[in-house]
Image (tube, helix red, strand yellow):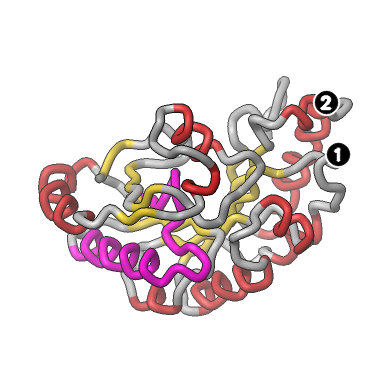
Amino acid sequence: MLYKTGVEYGDYTMNHVQGCSHGCRYPCYAFLMAKRFGNVADYESWCRPLLVENTLELLDREIPRLRSRIKSVQLCFTTDPFMYGYEDVCVLSLAPMRRLNRAGIPCVVLSKGMLPEELAGLGAANTYGITMVSLDESYRVAHEPGAAPYAERIESLRRLHDAGHRTWVSMEPYPTPNIHDQELLPILEEVSFVDRIIFGRTNYNKAVSAYPGCKGWYNDRAGEVVSFCRSNGIDYYIKKGTWTGDGRP
């Protein structure tokens, strides 16, 4: 259940659900890999999440063995711990977080759903985040059809910020203008209360490479994120492959 992730900004992770009801169509890397290796038959099956029912049993065996190596555990990299409208997924995410926190292991959460209020009562070292790549609900409906509306995500994150928890935003995969034409600054301003912003390009989508000057365009957007974060005292991270050339911010 617990394993070292290959994601560049992660430590350990757990994925206690297979599939994701949010059904992102960027496309979703986790779905592409699950289908490639035969773990899921098709998109419709992927959107019907399956719980790993012995999650807590596995954790009880693994935590004592791995505790000294783990700095943090992220929920999740191949699924979503708080799928919008799925109470059973939410319950199964809160329980292992409590187990990990009791063992002195902080959790890092990332969701396109609603971050539940119960999180405010968990470990003070936990960090809570949402994915935000737009404010336009038409984009969400087209590309994140099962995910929570953007305003609801922000509201749930702000509640945890106001309760004193560290918060962050993943702005990945950020779309090029031929996918969705929008301004980046209004999104940044909406989440300016967070402690950290991670910014990354859209991958696995031919439309991105078809956009004229896409590399320079992403460099400009990365620079905009860095400038905004520096001006507002926000930590930031630009994903590898997003910035190209010399002078990485």
Quadrant location of residue 29? Answer: top right
Image spot of residue 215 (x, y percent):
78, 26
Q: Which residue sits at x=45%, y=74%?
A: 116
Image spot of residue 21 (x, y percent):
51, 57
Q: Which residue sits at x=44%, y=48%?
A: 19
Q: Earlier in the sequence, mark 1 or mark 2?
A: 1
Which structural element holds mark 2?
Answer: helix
On screen, 78 above or below 98? above
**Mark 1 and mark 2 residues within 8 Å of each other at the beta carbon:** yes
The residue indicated by pointer 1 is: 178
| Residue in the foreground of this view, choosing between 90 and 215 | 90
In whole angstroms, how far apart are the C-alphas of marks 1 and 2?
9 Å
On whether residue 80 falls in the magenta region, the answer is yes
Q: Which residue sits at x=47%, y=28%?
A: 36
- Residue 146, label in figure: none
In the rendered view, does 178 fall on the left or right side of 107? right
Q: Residues within 10 Å of mark 2 (few under 14, many from 20)?
A: few
Residue type at numbered disc 2: Ala
**Span of residues in magenta:** 74-102
